[in-house]
Amino acid sequence: MHKPMPPLNALHAFEAAARHLSLTKAAQELHVTAGALSHQIRGLEELLGVKLFERHVRSIALTPAGKLLFPGLQTGFVHIRDAVSGLSNASQERVLVISTSPGFTSKWLALRLYRFTSVYPEIDVRVSSSISNANFTTDGVDVAIRNLPIDAAANSALVIEKLIEVSLVPVCSPKLVEMHGPLERPEALKGVPLIHDDTLADGAEKSTWADWFKAAGVDGVDVSRGLRFNGADHALDAAGEGAGVLLARDVLAYDDLRTGRLVIPVEFALRSGRAYHFVCPKSRREHPHVQAFRTWVKQEVATLDWRQVNRAGRLVPKPARP
């Protein structure tokens, strides 16, 4: 004999809390109080006869039973969202919503999207840029390009495919090299202004100029000085104007390097251990618009020609990774 089906609101409350591992964030998403959400979850635990969360003073964690229940519910709510979205009118069916970070949008994706829309004029592309990862369940996003660990963990509800690995390289304008003379060795950067992209230090990469100089074997550099930006695109723009040398994600600097607006003064790359990935819900991977974008973005990455990258006036290949 089957047990009665738990209330959908209680299941939704558990799914949101398990996804965020935070009652506060889950309550904000569902527009209820944290107390009401907690009450729904406790009622679900009583109905199921199992404990779903370990509750600590400032955090919660899934129990083995919670870990068993969560993947199926997460997938189920993605299907519910898709079913509701399927009722949209024909004009909405033409829309593809792409989620990326502001820096990736500005310095890579926006420069190429016209090629996608020219091949697929029937698709209306909308780009949603945000520092935090979009929620496929609640934000109406179809696909995303995300900066994740190279060996990103599998997700039962998502397709995650690596596109291109990211290294961190020093970049500057050619006129800065002319002003300060050849900057071919790491220690030469001790005497030039530094630019900081704080998204490297604040994000999961946790890589800074201090890490680059340490890896290069250079001591005694005051890395507390210099311009700071909370966006990779603004930091790259400043470097292009000659404001200093920036430690940049090579993928985001690619077009400025290819055109000669920026150069790599010192050929020493710091591996970040991260890569840009294509991500979409598994329930959406067969959708024609999603398949079209997946194929296109992989082709665009494959055509990147690092031989065109300009290093201090001559063409060199992308620094090799061991």
Image (spheres, rainbow, N blue to C red):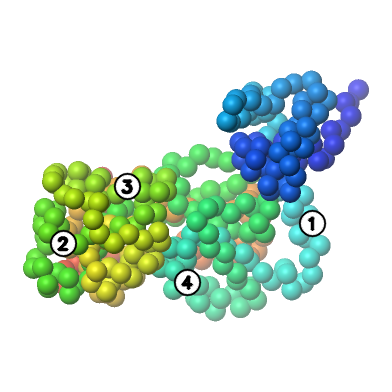
Outermost residue to the top? 49
Q: Marks 3 and 4, how far apart in space?
A: 26 Å
Position above or below: 33 against 264: above
Q: Position of residue 12 (x, y in %)?
A: 75, 41
Say if mark 2 contacts mark 1, CB within 8 Å: no
What kind of residue is marked 2? Val
Please state if 126 lies on the left or on the right of 306 as rendered. right
What kind of residue is marked 1? Val
Q: Which of marks 3 and 4 is nearer the N terminus?
A: 4
Where disc 4 sits, the SS reads: loop
Q: Where is residue 261 in the image (x, y as percent from the top left)?
A: 27, 74
Say if mark 4 contacts mark 2, CB within 8 Å: no
Q: Which of marks 1 and 4 is nearer the N terminus?
A: 1
Q: Marks 4 and 2, how far apart in space?
A: 31 Å
Quick one: quadrant of the N terminus? top right
Residue 207 is marked as 3
Where disc 1 sits, the SS reads: helix
Q: Marks 2 and 3, how far apart in space?
A: 20 Å
Q: Name the residue under label 4.
A: 110
Q: Name the residue under label 2.
A: 192
Name the mark nearer the viewer: 4 or 2: 2
Name the mark nearer the viewer: 3 or 4: 3
Name the mark nearer the viewer: 2 or 1: 2
